[in-house]
Amino acid sequence: MRTKLLIVIALLFCLQCGFFVDLGTNVDKTGAAIYGWVKDSISGQPLSGIQVAVPGKTDVILTDSDGFFAINGLYTGEKTVSLYAVGYQTITMSIPLTAGVKNLKTISLLRSNSAPVISEVLYPKPNQTATPLSLKFKVSVSEPDFQNLRSIEKLNFSLCIDTVQNTQPAFTGTINWPETKQSATIFLPNKYIYNLKANKQYYWKISVKDTMGGESQSFSGTFTTRDTTDICPSGMASIELEDNRFCMDKYEVTNRDYANFTSTAGIDSEHTEDASFSSGPSKPVTNVRFVKADEYCRFYLKRLCSPSQWLIATGGAEQNLYPYGNTYDQTKCNTAKTAFQNPADGGGADSVGANPDCVSPYGVYDLSGNVSEWIYYGDNVAYAEDWEGKTSFVFAGGSWSSGRRSGSSARDTLTFDAGSTYYRQEDVGFRCCSKTRPK
């Protein structure tokens, strides 16, 4: 009796654990299979590496490069099939399975969508005071969808900024996003906002919106611009870009200017006015070596301009390649003459300011062409040594024959020439820069 009882208990345990197969529902274990192909619902491209799961099947099934998968050795009956992939919505389907192959044909996966998040506006800070009169917004944004290699998500932005609230967007565009990164620090817009008014409160609102799900988020605030407008000495232009504020001579130093300097300072000019290419009181002085040009500027409490000052003054807030824009135009500045063309035939330098279209956004003339100009790297790096070990000084902007090589980018247009501290050249002049002073 005891033995029979133990047998009954064992049978009940086996039935509860599913040890015995219901022959009315399932046939032999190898009697059924599921085949299928998986593609992206938007692009139609096959998806590889998609995980396909069937309860009770312990093998990890992944789609191949054609998006194909095959699950063999299944019982017949009702089966649940699930497809998983990062960046896509999970699909679960119930399939009545009979003996043989069940071809699911093509399964389209829908991409998942996460809303973009503006984590922080890094600059300007909300309610910031003494804000410069030109700036870019620096924003920390996260978008989880971008970590998916297959994502074709894009983010659009809009920026409203004005002295009154609820204005129309002043800037709109698509954000250039680094690939496969979930978060990034970006600048909006990709060019400077400038000509802001001093001592004014500005209202701003930044919005980002994704293109896949239409999700959006906004961030708003205010800032107040600094309360003074800097001024510069007569003959100099006031230049500002974010925290960079300085003055620059509107015109290249002329032969007249340099003669007045040597007379006032009582020094030997070491200069002979170039009768060939830049003679005349209103033409730029040339054949002046770097140290004398630097001495001139210091005498008037100025300095030779630095590469960054040159870049800002020429390209402006738009960061253009030339004072007049990004496309070279030989009619704007004195850049298209033959190198040794006779001045009697129109060659050489023009009088400073003679080309009215060759002016930067800040009102500085002849930063492109006419004569190249010495620039200053600092007390300890005013020059470098070239591969021959000769002393090299730096000038920028191109001369009357430089053509396209007369743009704003110091890295692209600086020219290094070998020589000693006495090095000077017939097509190299200079101008000066100085600090601004409060109005």
Image (cartoon, rainbow, N blue to C red):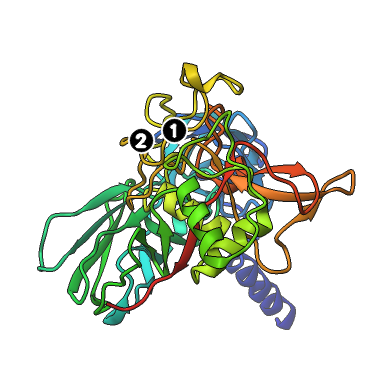
Question: SS at mark 2?
Answer: loop
Q: Which of 183 and 341 lies nearest the eye of the viewer?
A: 341
Instruction: Check disc 2: other Cα within 10 Å, few if <14, some if 14-19, many if 20+.
Output: some
Q: Residue at x 49, y 68 (%)?
A: 300
**Residue 149 image point, x, y percent:** 55, 46
Instruction: Check disc 1: other Cα within 10 Å, few if <14, some if 14-19, many if 20+.
Output: many
Question: SS at mark 1?
Answer: loop
Q: Amino acid at mark 2?
A: Ala
Q: Dots 1 and 2: beta carbons under 8 Å?
A: yes
- Identify the residue position indicated by label 2 in the image: 354
Q: Which mark is residue 179?
A: none
Classify 356 as above or below 221: above
Q: Residue at x 51, y 65 (%)?
A: 264
Instruction: Confirm whether residue 234 shows in the render.
Output: yes
Q: Amino acid at mark 1?
A: Asp
Q: Which of 274 and 150 lies nearest the eye of the viewer?
A: 274
- Identify the residue position indicated by label 1 in the image: 350
Classify 423 as above or below 243: above
